[in-house]
Image (spheres, helix red, strand yellow):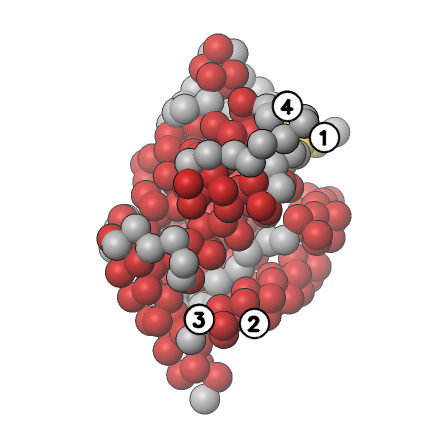
Amino acid sequence: MEDSTNREVINFLLQRFKIERNKFDRSGVYAYTQRLLAYNSNKIEGSTLTEEQTASLFDHGTLPKSDDYYRAKDVEEMNGHFLMYNKMLDTLDEPLSGELIKKFHYELKSGVFKDRANGYAIGEYKKRPNMIGIYQTVKPDDVEQEMNLLMDWYIHQDVNISKLAEFHARYESIHPFQDGNGRTGRLILFRECLKNEIVPIIIEDANRNEYLDALKEYREEKSLDKLTALFEKEQQFYMEKCKYFL
């Protein structure tokens, strides 16, 4: 019964996402999900924009008057996230691949002046080594191979919440891009839930520490227990929010 209910919810979401986006509807579940995912995913990475500011940027293309300065990078990345989400919807019929993930990254980062000025690869795998805190990630010369191995493994899986947790943890450990790995990774997570009739996952910034701790547990112990448990909690959060629109 639960699987049947999930399928109904996913089908509803897919229909509404398409209809509302084509009609430029900013009042339904498409717009709500755009704002929710963009706000939380960027906030996890240090964005200073609030939920209200995110909504204004998406709904009207403007920001409320403020006594504080707006950081250009935050605004550019928020707009990029909106575009990345649309790219994800446009390509749901395509199988997940390294090339498709690069397209997501391009939408997220192509309008970010700071990244371009720093010479970061946009829509391509990283050219310089990077780290996650004290942890080394895959070296640039090895990224292509590691991503291919990850994709080859993934396409042969019977996708469920545990497999998505493993994919996400491995993807974040590879850290294939110079910047924007978390945001692309969380978008892929949302996408693959939709494709596999799994209740989507949106990681809340309120659970940022729990999320980072779960990824740390994977890097150090190869355990997915915390990450899987968090994903299940975030499924409930998004499902409850979506019930308003059903």
**Mark 3–mark 2 distance (CA, rounded to whole Å):** 10 Å
Q: Amino acid at mark 3?
A: Phe
Lower position in the chain sequence, tag 3 or tag 2: 2
**Mark 4–mark 3 distance (CA, rounded to whole Å):** 35 Å
**Residue 14: x and y, percent?**
33, 64
Q: Nearer the viewer, mark 3 or mark 2?
A: 3
Q: Residue at x 54, y 67 (%)?
A: 241
Task: Determine contact: label 2, label 4, CB under 8 Å.
Answer: no
Disc 1, SS: loop
Residue under label 2, please give it. Answer: 240
Residue 245 badge: 3
Q: Nearer the viewer, mark 4 or mark 3?
A: 4
Residue under label 1, please give it. Answer: 133
Residue under label 4, please give it. Answer: 69
- Left or right relative to 26: residue 243: right
**Residue 183: x and y, percent?**
52, 40
Lower position in the chain sequence, tag 1 or tag 3: 1
Which of the two residues, 192 or 183, is positioned nearer the viewer here? 183
Q: Residue at x 57, y 20 (%)?
A: 129
Disc 3, SS: helix
**Residue 172: x and y, percent?**
57, 41
Q: Amino acid at mark 1?
A: Gly
Lower position in the chain sequence, tag 2 or tag 4: 4
